Image (tube, rainbow, N blue to C red):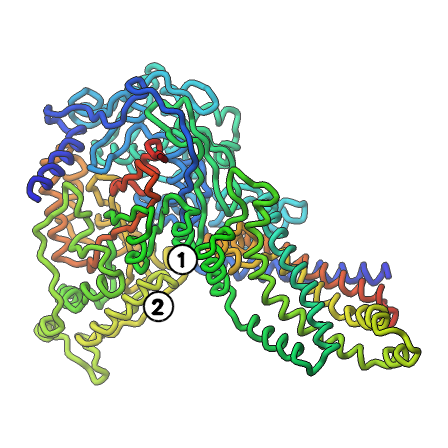
């Protein structure tokens, strides 16, 4: 087991270097750069821009810039944001709470509700309930989040006045209740699509398990419906879901750009887009590396957990 | 109407003669001193929204407009422009002029008297040393400075006493006052013992002399400010000021409608919402002129644009009225020049644009541009086909491009649209004049000063080896000569005919096809008072000290 983990981590390290190289190349070779936004400022001369570029080290050859960045990264220095002069890790950290709050809530809603609907649909395959849920899932998957968010704001904020039109909290209030009121709309809007996804996967997975021999055996033994469901079906149908959850981990921390924009939520998705728009190379590279690490760790964790809960799977 | 014009004329004249030799003038006393009126207890909270996020808090470092929204709250310049283009004192006891001896008659010696008794937010007294430090930091070669224009002439800055400062200019440079009006003063003591001023802790925890103290920032969301109760002018009248970042304009308008935003700031209300916005209960919605003008800029190094007849024909084939009415809901005003129509130096006698496909065709026929088999005109091996570029995703501009693409086709000119994201568009592609033509909104002025050397002087074109912003690569020896003459004169009445002539020549040469002068749709809640548009400043918070809630 330990050998398996070490070898996986070793592979991951090589992958990370490749990812960082490609990311850096794509980012810096694209035309434009962090100083182009000042081009339209009154009184900003080409000479001044060239001077600032030299001070920031942007005039050095790209390989030199890359290895310099990599060298610092290895000793834990992720660099400093061009946008606000803060260390990259602090910039990412300052958006972490907002992201975890929104994505965490949305994930809890979508996983629990999605699994419940999926299992129920599988058990009542072919009934009106199953078809209704299938149609609803298709609808939920087809609605653009942007539109749905604006409709939700229109209905619940502008017309009914029940919930705030956006933001994470009221400045000057910030009580738990205030956070909750602000959280409801974006979390539900965001969860909607994922509920649909989870319910479809869960339904399929449950159906596969239901037709297995051990379920038939359990039924033949005369076990109660309830016991068959919880002891034999649910546990087994969740196994593939663990892999799915592992793949979702980086998404949870990566934020949700559209929802964050509609609800002015200061999360990771906005940070990524704003940093990209500004060509804030250190922050973009930081986010890229962080999400690459999460993808690798999420996958590794999923594989390990599956191996732990499913005796049929052996690592090494 | 005439009366109003005269009033503006007098104000302008007064404003600029503050620098002038003419004796008839009084120091502008628009900024009221704290001594004259007791500050009311600041109360209430106000949320101002911007569609970009302010992130640079050292005002002397490279920044964008929204950052200045923060500077006016936290810092003070020495003096500033009011909406009529007059200077009013802020940190100075009086605005330096030739008449009051603040500027020598030849424009080379400057003497500035500061207000006594001003303190920084941390309680440290503000002195001439702080001003000296700020000006010198701007010129420091190791510092990532926002600007060098004007400062390269400044030398021998001396703090004579705590409240008096002198310096010399190597050349008389009239726009210097306007540049100082957008130079915010920062505290010297915040940089004591700091090795690299580019990364000083101050840059993320600014201390100023302004009406509000920087309280805290939530990255990606908002910045909170609290009233500076020791402020040296009247105000502030708000206990808390919130500058909120709302990245999407539709969302920003929705939050204005729902009441989450009290004042809608930069990028404002988009023209398509104007009709509805004007009917919103409990809101004030106003149109305000901006100093930015929209134009189709031509790259004057390209063979297609060498013949003046081509540029004239293109201008004639530009359906300005349709673009303004159909796309921009008639909000901006058509213009013939880069100079804002509110300016003292604006030339109202420029020839008016006429849209005529017929005349444009006749003009090109006459100039010998013949249509080829593909319907595109050509002459001496040069085809009248070129690309037009602007910021991708700016929908109104992209639609405007399609408008003129069609009308230009009717005169045998082929336009290919080639747009880029902002970082690409306004990078080397723009600075090094790699484009054929662009659609661009430019503000060529520093405050209310009419100097535009950076944009129209032939030596200011990077592609011709210069270092300025003349990316159209325009060159006209007569304009060069007039620009030099204008910048060396301190008398507004002498400068006016010079800058009017420059506008006339540029209108004839057409290095850019002027489309309109921007107008912005601003809005605030009815219980907010003091918000006042100011065409001479880049951002709304120029007078945030006066903002109130009732």
Residue bearing mark 1? B250
Q: Is residue B392 left or right of residue A75?
A: left
Task: Give the image location of residue B80, x and y in percent.
Answer: 28, 32
Residue at 53%, 50% in the rendered image: A266
Q: How many other residues sit within 10 Å of disc 1, few (<14), some (14-19) or many (≥20)?
A: some
The answer to which quarter of the image holds residue A10 is bottom right
Tell me the element at label 2.
Answer: loop
Looking at marks 1 and 2 on the same chain, the residue that comes earlier in the sequence is marked by: 1
Residue at 21%, 85% in the rendered image: B373
Task: Give the image location of residue B239, x and y in percent.
Answer: 43, 31
Tell me the element at label 1.
Answer: helix
| Depth check, front residue: B308 or A267 | A267
Residue at 53%, 42% in the rendered image: B218
Count of all numbered marks drawn on residues in the image: 2
Mark whose residue sits in front, 1 or 2? 1
Q: How many other residues sit within 10 Å of disc 2, few (<14), some (14-19) or many (≥20)?
A: some
| Depth check, front residue: B505 or B404 | B404
Q: Quadrant of the N terminus of chain B?
A: top left
The numbered mark at residue B515 is: none
Residue located farthest toward the bottom when viewing the structure as drawn? B373
Q: Is residue A85 left or right of residue B286?
A: right
Residue located farthest toward the top when viewing the structure as drawn? B161
The numbered mark at residue B418 is: 2
Q: Is residue B327 left or right of residue A301?
A: left
Chain to which the residue tagged by mark 2 belongs:
B
| Depth check, front residue: B388 or A132 | A132
Q: Quadrant of the C terminus of chain B?
A: top left
Task: Give the image location of residue A299, x and y in percent.
Answer: 73, 63
Instruction: Mark yes or no: residue A264 visible.
Output: no
**Image height of B166 relative to A126, above or below:** above
Q: Is residue A67 left or right of residue B493?
A: right
Residue located farthest toward the right when viewing the structure as drawn? A221
């Amino acid at each position: 087991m330990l050998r398996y983990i070490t070898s996986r981590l070793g592979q991951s390290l090589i992958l990370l270097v490749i990812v960082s190289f490609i990311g850096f190349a794509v980012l810096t070779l694209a035309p434009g750069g962090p100083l182009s936004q000042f081009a339209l400022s009154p009184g900003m001369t080409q000479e001044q821009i060239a001077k600032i570029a030299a001070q920031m080290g942007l005039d050095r050859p790209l390989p030199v810039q890359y290895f310099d960045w990599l060298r610092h990264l290895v000793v834990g220095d992720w660099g400093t944001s061009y946008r606000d002069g803060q260390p990259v890790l602090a910039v990412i950290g300052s958006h972490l709470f907002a992201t975890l709050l929104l994505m965490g809530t949305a994930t809890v809603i979508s996983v629990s509700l999605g699994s419940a609907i999926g299992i129920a649909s599988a058990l009542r395959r072919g009934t009106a309930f199953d078809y209704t849920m299938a149609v609803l899932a298709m609808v939920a998957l087809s609605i653009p989040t942007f539109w749905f968010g604006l409709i939700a704001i229109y209905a619940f904020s502008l017309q009914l006045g029940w919930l705030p039109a956006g933001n994470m909290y009221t400045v000057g209030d910030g009580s738990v209740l205030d956070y909750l009121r602000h959280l409801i709309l974006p979390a539900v809007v965001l969860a909607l699509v994922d509920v649909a996804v989870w319910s479809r996967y869960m339904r399929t997975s449950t159906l596969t398990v239901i037709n297995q021999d051990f379920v038939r055996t359990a039924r033949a033994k005369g076990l109660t419906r309830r016991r068959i469901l919880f002891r034999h079906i649910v546990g087994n149908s969740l196994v593939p879901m663990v892999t799915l959850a592992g793949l979702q981990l980086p998404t949870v921390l990566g934020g949700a750009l559209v929802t964050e924009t509609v609800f002015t939520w200061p999360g990771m998705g906005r940070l990524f887009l704003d940093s990209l728009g500004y060509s804030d190379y250190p922050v973009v590279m930081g986010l890229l590396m962080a999400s690459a690490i999460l993808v690798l760790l999420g996958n590794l964790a999923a594989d390990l957990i599956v191996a732990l809960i499913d005796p049929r799977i052996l690592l090494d | 109407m005439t009366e109003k014009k005269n009033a503006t004329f007098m104000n302008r004249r007064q404003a600029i003669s503050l620098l002038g030799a003419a004796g008839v003038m009084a120091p502008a006393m628009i900024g009221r001193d704290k001594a004259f009126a007791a500050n009311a207890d600041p109360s209430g909270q106000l949320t101002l929204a911007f569609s970009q996020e302010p992130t640079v808090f050292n005002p002397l470092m490279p920044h964008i407009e929204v950052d200045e929204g923060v500077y006016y709250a936290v810092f003070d310049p020495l003096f500033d422009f009011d909406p009529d283009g007059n200077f009013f004192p802020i940190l100075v006891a009086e605005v330096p002029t030739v008449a009051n001896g603040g500027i020598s008659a030849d424009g080379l010696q400057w003497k500035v008297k500061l207000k006594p008794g001003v303190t920084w937010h941390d309680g440290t007294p503000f002195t001439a040393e702080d001003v000296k430090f700020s000006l010198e930091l701007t010129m420091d070669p190791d510092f990532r400075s926002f600007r060098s224009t004007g400062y390269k002439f400044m030398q021998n800055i001396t703090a004579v006493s705590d409240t008096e400062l002198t310096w010399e200019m190597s050349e008389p440079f009239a726009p210097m006052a306007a540049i100082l009006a957008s130079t915010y003063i920062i505290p010297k003591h915040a940089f004591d013992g700091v090795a690299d001023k580019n990364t000083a802790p101050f840059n993320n925890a600014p201390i100023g002399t302004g009406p509000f103290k920087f309280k805290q920032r939530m990255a990606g969301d908002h910045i909170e400010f609290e009233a500076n109760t020791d402020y040296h002018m009247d105000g502030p009248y708000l206990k808390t000021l919130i500058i909120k970042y709302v990245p999407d304009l539709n969302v920003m308008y929705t939050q204005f409608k729902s009441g989450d935003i009290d004042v809608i700031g930069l990028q404002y209300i988009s023209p398509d919402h104007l009709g509805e916005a004007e009917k919103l209960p409990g809101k004030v919605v106003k149109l305000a002129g901006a100093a930015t003008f929209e134009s189709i800029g031509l790259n004057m190094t390209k063979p297609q644009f060498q013949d003046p007849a081509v540029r004239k024909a293109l201008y004639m084939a530009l359906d300005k009225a349709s673009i303004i009415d159909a796309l921009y809901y008639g909000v901006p005003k058509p213009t013939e020049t880069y100079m804002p129509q509110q300016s003292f130096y604006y030339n109202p006698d420029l020839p008016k644009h006429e849209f005529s496909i017929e005349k444009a065709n006749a003009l090109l026929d006459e100039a010998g541009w013949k249509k080829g088999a593909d319907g595109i005109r050509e002459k001496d091996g040069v085809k009248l086909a070129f690309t037009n570029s602007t910021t991708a995703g700016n929908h109104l501009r992209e639609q405007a491009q399609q408008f003129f693409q069609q009308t230009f086709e009717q005169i045998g000119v082929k336009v290919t649209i080639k747009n880029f994201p902002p970082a690409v568009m306004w990078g080397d592609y723009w600075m090094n004049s790699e484009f054929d033509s662009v659609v661009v909104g430019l503000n060529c002025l520093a405050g209310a000063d009419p100097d535009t050397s950076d944009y129209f002087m032939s030596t200011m074109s990077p592609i011709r080896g210069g270092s300025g912003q003349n990316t159209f690569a325009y060159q006209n020896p007569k304009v060069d000569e007039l620009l030099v003459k204008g910048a060396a004169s301190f008398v507004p009445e002498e400068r006016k005919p010079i800058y009017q002539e420059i506008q006339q020549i540029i209108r004839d040469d057409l290095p850019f096809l002027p489309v309109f002068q921007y107008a912005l749709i601003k809005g605030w809640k009815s219980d907010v008072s003091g918000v006042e548009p100011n065409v001479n400043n880049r951002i709304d918070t120029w007078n945030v000290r006066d903002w109130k809630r009732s």
